[in-house]
Amino acid sequence: MESHQSSTTNAVGLCLLPSELIQYILLCLPLPDVYRFKSVSKSIALLISDQDFVRDYNLQSSSATWLFIYKKRWKRDAVLHGFTDCSNRWFKFLIADTLKEMIPRCEDLYFLTASGDHFLFALNTSQEVILVNPVLKTIKRIPPSPLGPRCTSSWRRSGMKLLSGPPGVGHFRFLFAEMNEDFPVLFEYSSITDKWHSTVARENFGVLQRCNGREGDPSFLSIFNGRNESVLIATGSQGETPVVVRPRFHGGGNDEGQSAVGFGWGNAINRLQVYGDGNMVIARSESVDVAKSNTKLLKSLELWSLSSDGRRWEFISNVPSELIDQIKKPHGVMMGCLEESKGTVRVVLMSNFESVWDIIWLCYGRGEREWTWVPVPDCKMKGSNLAGITFSSGLTLS
């Protein structure tokens, strides 16, 4: 974060500009900076509170992509950090004061996912789920799911989805998929009714209506992901019957060592598979001959997507070797997060080497068929534990 003196100087200079230019500048700022400028002057505060400005800002911020991570040293020494692709620094979201009024000090929180202004956390001790709005500083307890209390290890990132309603409305849907009594089931919570609804998914016998991550696509929630096969649920709008898809994978049977799904740790793990939104990224690594160290280097990254009938994983693209050479660093532990929206696939790989975390953010544009690298500044995570990571849409003014 910038120093207070630097922020004050910049703010005073901003007030001297024409109002149209001030509005243009504010529309380009991330939400934390917009709130900071509210305290600069009465005229800027009135501009930010104007309903026309709020509408324009929310429309523009909806296209911004945020990466959020939740890190902690101890149970109560935890901070939510956010980085957006339209900025060059991390923002700190102070939620501790919001949480302490409802959450016991002995509770252990894990960050599950986010959408817009909604942030979902799992409580490991009480096995509850809560929704936090860091902008409004509110907390909502989610009623227990039909499957009962769940510890944090029961939640799979690729098997759940948080869907926010229109900006300013405050409604949301939380979905997750599980096998229940040998049947694939979609569980859905609606904030409107404050109730859960469960639906047994039907088998897929047709063509999946998919538009490559654009509006109207079904949401894909993973139930099981193995080395060569997966089971997912595809669900559309509320009220539609979800569909089971069972894609097979025939592209990686010759790897040496073992593979890991979502999280790779150990000398034998040379292939990491990361899933999200009907896509799969395979990160292949190679061991580095360092004495008494499980050290590896990233060798390649592949993007695969569901076929139109949902019966197989289809190869889409390799990350160019020139880009791999720029981003690869030694690692012992690696995990990933993957999402797709509006025709762009985004993947983040977090690796750890000797207590130092490194973050790689890559994007693949389906229309351009090109990979881009989003450089991420150091998040100062040395000595901290990672307690959750996710992509999210833009935050909104209220």
Image (spheres, rainbow, N blue to C red):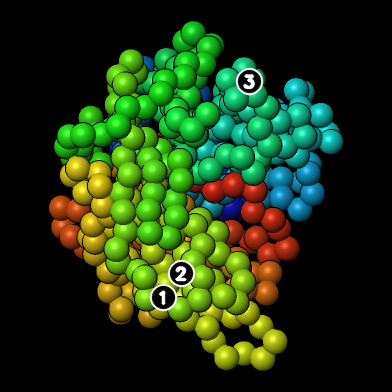
Pinpoint residue 332: horizontal percent, then vertical percent. Answer: 60, 73
| Tag nearer the camera, 1 or 2 | 1
Q: Can residue 165 be spotted in the picture? A: yes
Dot 3: what SS?
Answer: loop
Which residue has dot 2 on it?
271
Nearer-the-camera pick, 28 or 205: 205
Measure the alpha-carbon separation of dots 1 and 2.
Answer: 8 Å
Which residue has dot 3 on it?
144
| Quarter of image, res 221 | top left
| Tag nearer the camera, 1 or 3 | 1
Q: Is residue 303 left or right of residue 186?
A: left
Query: Which residue does the image show at 54% across and 87% down from the upper left?
Result: 288
Q: Earlier in the sequence, mark 1 or mark 3?
A: 3
Q: Is residue 144 left or right of residue 36?
A: right
The single residue placed furthest to the right in the displayed view is 106
Labels 1 & 2 near each other (Cβ < 8 A):
yes
Query: Which residue does the image show at 22% across and 60% down from the upper left?
Result: 316
Label 1 is placed on what type of residue?
Asp
Compared with 368, 284 (above or below) is: below
Query: Which residue does the image show at 16% across and 37% down from the upper left?
Result: 207
Q: Is residue 188 left or right of residue 334?
A: left
Q: Earlier in the sequence, mark 1 or mark 2?
A: 1
Which residue has dot 1 on it?
255
Measure the alpha-carbon separation of dots 1 and 3.
Answer: 41 Å
Pinpoint residue 101: horizontal percent, then vertical percent. Answer: 77, 23
Measure the alpha-carbon separation of dots 3 and 2.
Answer: 36 Å
Compared with 282, 2 (above or below) is: above
